[in-house]
Amino acid sequence: MAKAKYRHALPQTGESMFLADGGIETTLIFHQGVELRSFAAFELLGTEEGRRELSAYFTPYVALARAHGSGLVLESATWRSNPEWGAALGYGAEALDAINAAGIEFLLALRAAEETAAGPIVVSGCVGPRGDGYAPEVSMSADEAEAYHGRQVRVFAEAGADLVTAITMTYPEEGIGVARAARAAGIPAVVSFTVETDGRLRSGHTLAEAIALCDAATEAYPAYYMVNCAHPTHFEDCLAGEAWLERIGGVRANASKMSHAELDEAPELDDGDPAEFGEDYRRLRARLPRLRVLGGCCGTDHRHIGAAGHACHGHARAA
Protein backbone atom coordinates (compact mmCIF):
# COMPACT_ATOMS: atom_id res chain seq x y z
CA MET A 1 0.00 0.00 0.00
CA ALA A 2 1.40 3.39 -1.04
CA LYS A 3 1.75 5.95 1.73
CA ALA A 4 -0.62 8.90 1.31
CA LYS A 5 0.80 12.34 2.07
CA TYR A 6 -2.24 14.23 3.37
CA ARG A 7 -4.71 11.51 4.34
CA HIS A 8 -4.58 12.25 8.06
CA ALA A 9 -4.62 16.05 7.77
CA LEU A 10 -6.35 17.34 4.63
CA PRO A 11 -4.96 20.86 4.15
CA GLN A 12 -8.05 22.09 2.27
CA THR A 13 -10.08 21.80 5.48
CA GLY A 14 -8.08 24.63 7.03
CA GLU A 15 -8.33 28.34 6.32
CA SER A 16 -6.49 28.62 2.99
CA MET A 17 -8.06 28.66 -0.44
CA PHE A 18 -7.50 25.70 -2.76
CA LEU A 19 -8.19 25.59 -6.46
CA ALA A 20 -9.38 22.44 -8.20
CA ASP A 21 -9.44 21.47 -11.85
CA GLY A 22 -12.39 22.11 -14.16
CA GLY A 23 -14.51 20.03 -16.51
CA ILE A 24 -12.08 17.34 -17.60
CA GLU A 25 -14.30 15.53 -20.09
CA THR A 26 -15.65 18.65 -21.83
CA THR A 27 -12.16 20.16 -22.00
CA LEU A 28 -10.69 17.01 -23.50
CA ILE A 29 -13.48 16.70 -26.06
CA PHE A 30 -14.11 20.30 -27.10
CA HIS A 31 -10.75 21.99 -26.51
CA GLN A 32 -8.22 19.20 -27.00
CA GLY A 33 -10.12 17.28 -29.68
CA VAL A 34 -9.99 13.95 -27.84
CA GLU A 35 -12.66 11.37 -28.54
CA LEU A 36 -14.03 9.84 -25.33
CA ARG A 37 -16.31 6.84 -25.34
CA SER A 38 -19.19 7.48 -22.91
CA PHE A 39 -17.26 10.38 -21.30
CA ALA A 40 -14.70 7.82 -20.11
CA ALA A 41 -11.51 9.83 -19.63
CA PHE A 42 -10.00 6.89 -17.75
CA GLU A 43 -9.20 5.16 -21.04
CA LEU A 44 -6.51 7.77 -21.67
CA LEU A 45 -4.51 6.36 -18.77
CA GLY A 46 -3.79 3.25 -20.81
CA THR A 47 -1.68 4.83 -23.56
CA GLU A 48 1.31 7.17 -23.75
CA GLU A 49 -0.61 9.50 -26.06
CA GLY A 50 -3.56 9.51 -23.68
CA ARG A 51 -1.34 10.37 -20.72
CA ARG A 52 0.10 13.27 -22.72
CA GLU A 53 -3.43 14.59 -23.22
CA LEU A 54 -4.08 14.30 -19.49
CA SER A 55 -0.84 16.15 -18.75
CA ALA A 56 -1.91 18.91 -21.14
CA TYR A 57 -5.22 19.10 -19.27
CA PHE A 58 -3.84 19.22 -15.72
CA THR A 59 -0.76 21.42 -16.27
CA PRO A 60 -2.63 24.77 -16.55
CA TYR A 61 -4.23 24.21 -13.14
CA VAL A 62 -0.85 23.66 -11.53
CA ALA A 63 0.29 26.97 -13.02
CA LEU A 64 -2.87 28.72 -11.83
CA ALA A 65 -2.49 27.52 -8.26
CA ARG A 66 1.12 28.65 -8.25
CA ALA A 67 0.15 32.08 -9.62
CA HIS A 68 -2.54 32.48 -6.94
CA GLY A 69 -0.32 31.19 -4.17
CA SER A 70 -2.90 28.53 -3.35
CA GLY A 71 -3.07 24.80 -2.90
CA LEU A 72 -4.62 22.50 -5.49
CA VAL A 73 -7.00 19.54 -5.28
CA LEU A 74 -6.85 17.24 -8.31
CA GLU A 75 -9.37 14.51 -9.14
CA SER A 76 -8.26 11.33 -10.88
CA ALA A 77 -9.66 10.75 -14.35
CA THR A 78 -11.83 7.89 -13.07
CA TRP A 79 -15.38 9.27 -12.98
CA ARG A 80 -16.55 6.45 -15.30
CA SER A 81 -14.31 3.61 -14.09
CA ASN A 82 -16.84 1.74 -11.99
CA PRO A 83 -18.17 -1.78 -12.65
CA GLU A 84 -21.10 -1.16 -14.99
CA TRP A 85 -19.57 1.63 -17.05
CA GLY A 86 -16.32 -0.32 -17.23
CA ALA A 87 -18.08 -3.49 -18.36
CA ALA A 88 -19.96 -1.58 -21.05
CA LEU A 89 -16.61 -0.44 -22.41
CA GLY A 90 -15.03 -3.89 -22.22
CA TYR A 91 -13.16 -3.71 -18.91
CA GLY A 92 -13.31 -6.48 -16.34
CA ALA A 93 -12.75 -6.06 -12.62
CA GLU A 94 -8.97 -6.56 -12.67
CA ALA A 95 -8.52 -4.21 -15.62
CA LEU A 96 -10.53 -1.54 -13.75
CA ASP A 97 -8.37 -2.07 -10.68
CA ALA A 98 -5.29 -1.36 -12.78
CA ILE A 99 -6.87 1.72 -14.36
CA ASN A 100 -8.02 3.11 -11.01
CA ALA A 101 -4.55 2.63 -9.52
CA ALA A 102 -3.01 4.23 -12.60
CA GLY A 103 -5.26 7.27 -12.16
CA ILE A 104 -3.82 7.88 -8.71
CA GLU A 105 -0.25 7.07 -9.74
CA PHE A 106 -0.51 9.62 -12.57
CA LEU A 107 -1.45 12.40 -10.14
CA LEU A 108 1.16 11.34 -7.58
CA ALA A 109 3.83 11.66 -10.27
CA LEU A 110 2.52 15.10 -11.20
CA ARG A 111 2.63 16.12 -7.54
CA ALA A 112 6.18 14.86 -7.14
CA ALA A 113 7.25 17.01 -10.09
CA GLU A 114 5.26 20.17 -9.37
CA GLU A 115 4.37 20.56 -5.69
CA THR A 116 5.99 23.35 -3.68
CA ALA A 117 6.02 24.01 0.04
CA ALA A 118 3.68 26.96 -0.48
CA GLY A 119 1.32 25.07 -2.78
CA PRO A 120 0.30 21.62 -1.59
CA ILE A 121 -1.28 19.33 -4.19
CA VAL A 122 -3.94 17.00 -2.79
CA VAL A 123 -4.74 13.84 -4.76
CA SER A 124 -8.34 12.64 -4.77
CA GLY A 125 -9.72 9.41 -6.16
CA CYS A 126 -12.81 10.36 -8.16
CA VAL A 127 -15.82 8.07 -7.70
CA GLY A 128 -18.57 8.67 -10.24
CA PRO A 129 -22.21 7.59 -10.07
CA ARG A 130 -23.27 4.08 -11.00
CA GLY A 131 -25.74 5.47 -13.51
CA ASP A 132 -25.95 8.56 -15.64
CA GLY A 133 -24.89 11.70 -13.81
CA TYR A 134 -27.94 13.58 -15.07
CA ALA A 135 -30.71 10.98 -15.22
CA PRO A 136 -29.92 7.88 -13.16
CA GLU A 137 -31.94 4.81 -14.08
CA VAL A 138 -31.06 2.76 -10.99
CA SER A 139 -31.22 3.88 -7.37
CA MET A 140 -29.37 1.83 -4.78
CA SER A 141 -29.77 1.50 -1.06
CA ALA A 142 -26.86 2.74 1.02
CA ASP A 143 -25.73 -0.85 1.59
CA GLU A 144 -25.87 -1.62 -2.13
CA ALA A 145 -23.92 1.55 -2.92
CA GLU A 146 -21.24 0.66 -0.38
CA ALA A 147 -20.82 -2.76 -1.95
CA TYR A 148 -20.90 -1.40 -5.50
CA HIS A 149 -18.27 1.32 -4.99
CA GLY A 150 -16.21 -0.45 -2.32
CA ARG A 151 -13.67 -2.09 -4.61
CA GLN A 152 -12.80 1.15 -6.42
CA VAL A 153 -12.45 2.99 -3.10
CA ARG A 154 -10.13 0.29 -1.74
CA VAL A 155 -7.93 0.52 -4.84
CA PHE A 156 -7.66 4.29 -4.40
CA ALA A 157 -6.71 3.86 -0.76
CA GLU A 158 -4.06 1.26 -1.57
CA ALA A 159 -2.66 3.39 -4.42
CA GLY A 160 -1.96 6.30 -2.06
CA ALA A 161 -4.80 8.75 -2.68
CA ASP A 162 -5.26 11.36 0.04
CA LEU A 163 -9.05 11.07 -0.12
CA VAL A 164 -11.91 9.89 -2.31
CA THR A 165 -14.58 12.20 -3.71
CA ALA A 166 -17.99 11.00 -4.81
CA ILE A 167 -18.79 13.32 -7.72
CA THR A 168 -22.25 14.04 -9.18
CA MET A 169 -24.35 12.18 -6.64
CA THR A 170 -28.06 12.57 -7.44
CA TYR A 171 -29.52 10.97 -4.30
CA PRO A 172 -28.29 10.63 -0.72
CA GLU A 173 -28.00 6.83 -0.49
CA GLU A 174 -25.24 6.61 -3.10
CA GLY A 175 -23.22 9.26 -1.28
CA ILE A 176 -23.77 7.42 1.99
CA GLY A 177 -22.51 4.20 0.42
CA VAL A 178 -19.31 5.81 -0.85
CA ALA A 179 -18.67 7.44 2.55
CA ARG A 180 -19.14 4.10 4.31
CA ALA A 181 -16.82 2.37 1.83
CA ALA A 182 -14.21 5.05 2.47
CA ARG A 183 -14.52 4.63 6.22
CA ALA A 184 -14.01 0.87 5.84
CA ALA A 185 -10.92 1.51 3.70
CA GLY A 186 -9.47 4.05 6.13
CA ILE A 187 -9.48 7.00 3.73
CA PRO A 188 -11.25 10.39 4.04
CA ALA A 189 -14.30 11.01 1.89
CA VAL A 190 -15.99 13.99 0.30
CA VAL A 191 -19.51 13.74 -1.12
CA SER A 192 -20.52 16.08 -3.92
CA PHE A 193 -24.20 16.38 -4.84
CA THR A 194 -25.60 17.73 -8.08
CA VAL A 195 -28.86 19.64 -8.26
CA GLU A 196 -31.42 20.64 -10.85
CA THR A 197 -32.31 24.23 -11.72
CA ASP A 198 -34.59 24.40 -8.66
CA GLY A 199 -31.68 23.68 -6.33
CA ARG A 200 -32.93 20.19 -5.43
CA LEU A 201 -31.35 16.83 -6.11
CA ARG A 202 -33.04 14.71 -8.75
CA SER A 203 -34.37 12.61 -5.85
CA GLY A 204 -36.29 15.69 -4.66
CA HIS A 205 -34.14 16.29 -1.58
CA THR A 206 -32.82 19.73 -0.78
CA LEU A 207 -29.08 20.06 -0.26
CA ALA A 208 -29.72 20.55 3.45
CA GLU A 209 -31.76 17.33 3.61
CA ALA A 210 -29.21 15.31 1.61
CA ILE A 211 -26.32 16.45 3.81
CA ALA A 212 -28.29 15.79 7.00
CA LEU A 213 -29.21 12.28 5.84
CA CYS A 214 -25.62 11.48 4.86
CA ASP A 215 -24.21 12.81 8.12
CA ALA A 216 -26.79 10.91 10.17
CA ALA A 217 -26.07 7.63 8.35
CA THR A 218 -22.27 7.91 8.56
CA GLU A 219 -21.70 9.64 11.92
CA ALA A 220 -20.69 12.72 9.86
CA TYR A 221 -17.83 10.82 8.24
CA PRO A 222 -17.39 13.03 5.12
CA ALA A 223 -14.65 15.62 5.64
CA TYR A 224 -16.96 18.07 3.86
CA TYR A 225 -19.53 18.22 1.09
CA MET A 226 -19.49 19.79 -2.34
CA VAL A 227 -21.91 20.84 -5.05
CA ASN A 228 -21.02 20.08 -8.66
CA CYS A 229 -22.46 19.94 -12.18
CA ALA A 230 -24.89 22.83 -11.66
CA HIS A 231 -24.56 26.54 -12.33
CA PRO A 232 -24.29 28.72 -9.18
CA THR A 233 -27.58 30.44 -10.02
CA HIS A 234 -29.33 27.07 -9.74
CA PHE A 235 -28.59 26.68 -6.04
CA GLU A 236 -27.35 29.93 -4.48
CA ASP A 237 -30.85 30.97 -3.39
CA CYS A 238 -31.15 27.67 -1.51
CA LEU A 239 -28.15 28.44 0.68
CA ALA A 240 -30.10 29.51 3.71
CA GLY A 241 -29.81 28.27 7.26
CA GLU A 242 -26.90 27.93 9.61
CA ALA A 243 -25.11 24.75 10.66
CA TRP A 244 -25.47 22.77 7.43
CA LEU A 245 -23.78 25.49 5.38
CA GLU A 246 -20.62 24.89 7.42
CA ARG A 247 -20.46 21.41 5.87
CA ILE A 248 -20.04 22.69 2.29
CA GLY A 249 -16.33 22.95 1.62
CA GLY A 250 -16.17 23.02 -2.16
CA VAL A 251 -18.00 23.88 -5.37
CA ARG A 252 -17.36 22.59 -8.88
CA ALA A 253 -20.01 24.43 -10.88
CA ASN A 254 -20.98 24.23 -14.54
CA ALA A 255 -20.18 27.09 -16.89
CA SER A 256 -23.63 26.94 -18.49
CA LYS A 257 -26.91 28.06 -16.97
CA MET A 258 -28.76 25.40 -18.96
CA SER A 259 -30.56 22.54 -17.23
CA HIS A 260 -29.17 19.02 -17.31
CA ALA A 261 -31.78 18.04 -19.90
CA GLU A 262 -30.80 20.99 -22.10
CA LEU A 263 -27.11 20.19 -21.76
CA ASP A 264 -27.77 16.61 -22.81
CA GLU A 265 -29.29 17.88 -26.07
CA ALA A 266 -26.85 20.72 -26.72
CA PRO A 267 -24.85 20.19 -29.95
CA GLU A 268 -22.06 22.57 -28.94
CA LEU A 269 -20.20 23.45 -25.76
CA ASP A 270 -21.68 26.28 -23.70
CA ASP A 271 -18.71 27.68 -21.80
CA GLY A 272 -20.58 30.69 -20.41
CA ASP A 273 -18.65 33.78 -19.35
CA PRO A 274 -15.52 33.14 -17.25
CA ALA A 275 -15.56 36.62 -15.71
CA GLU A 276 -19.19 36.23 -14.68
CA PHE A 277 -18.35 32.77 -13.36
CA GLY A 278 -15.77 34.36 -11.08
CA GLU A 279 -18.32 36.83 -9.72
CA ASP A 280 -20.73 33.95 -9.10
CA TYR A 281 -18.07 32.34 -6.93
CA ARG A 282 -17.47 35.59 -5.07
CA ARG A 283 -21.15 35.56 -4.07
CA LEU A 284 -20.92 31.90 -3.04
CA ARG A 285 -17.91 32.66 -0.84
CA ALA A 286 -19.99 35.24 1.00
CA ARG A 287 -22.75 32.68 1.66
CA LEU A 288 -20.66 29.62 2.45
CA PRO A 289 -18.39 30.20 5.47
CA ARG A 290 -16.26 27.08 4.91
CA LEU A 291 -15.97 27.21 1.12
CA ARG A 292 -12.30 26.54 0.44
CA VAL A 293 -12.13 24.42 -2.75
CA LEU A 294 -12.93 26.26 -5.99
CA GLY A 295 -13.22 24.09 -9.07
CA GLY A 296 -15.39 23.52 -12.11
CA CYS A 297 -17.47 20.97 -13.94
CA CYS A 298 -19.03 20.78 -17.41
CA GLY A 299 -17.90 23.52 -19.78
CA THR A 300 -15.29 25.00 -17.44
CA ASP A 301 -11.57 25.18 -18.08
CA HIS A 302 -8.58 26.99 -16.61
CA ARG A 303 -10.06 30.38 -17.59
CA HIS A 304 -13.06 29.85 -15.31
CA ILE A 305 -11.01 28.57 -12.41
CA GLY A 306 -8.59 31.46 -12.82
CA ALA A 307 -11.50 33.92 -12.69
CA ALA A 308 -12.93 32.23 -9.60
CA GLY A 309 -9.55 32.28 -7.90
CA HIS A 310 -9.05 35.95 -8.73
CA ALA A 311 -12.52 36.90 -7.48
CA CYS A 312 -12.20 34.95 -4.23
CA HIS A 313 -8.53 35.26 -3.41
CA GLY A 314 -8.83 38.40 -1.30
CA HIS A 315 -11.83 36.94 0.53
CA ALA A 316 -9.96 33.74 1.26
CA ARG A 317 -6.92 35.58 2.56
CA ALA A 318 -9.11 37.68 4.85
CA ALA A 319 -10.86 34.57 6.15
Image (cartoon, helix red, strand yellow):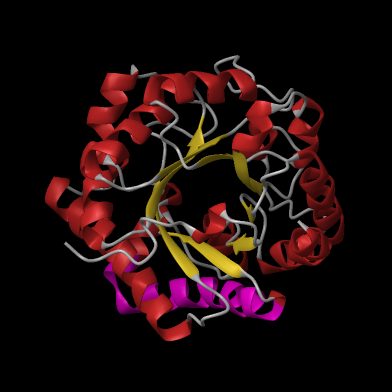
Secondary structure that dominates the magenta span? helix
| Residue appearing at x 60%, y 14% in the figure | 204
x%, y% of residue 237?
A: 82, 28
In terms of depth relative to the viewer, which is nearer, 108 or 15?
15
Residue 25 magenta: no
Q: Can residue 87 be seen in this view?
A: no
Question: Residue 153 lies in what quarter of the image?
Answer: top left
Residue 66 magenta: yes
x%, y% of residue 1?
A: 16, 61
Give the farthest residue toward the left. 94
x%, y% of residue 120?
A: 51, 72
Q: Can residue 88 be seen in this view?
A: yes
The C terminus sits in image quarter: bottom right
Q: Is residue 167 left or right of residue 274?
A: left
| Residue appearing at x 39%, y 62% in the figure | 6
Q: Is residue 6 left or right of residue 244?
A: left
Part of the protein shown in magenta: 45-67
In terms of depth relative to the viewer, which is nearer, 43 or 152?
152
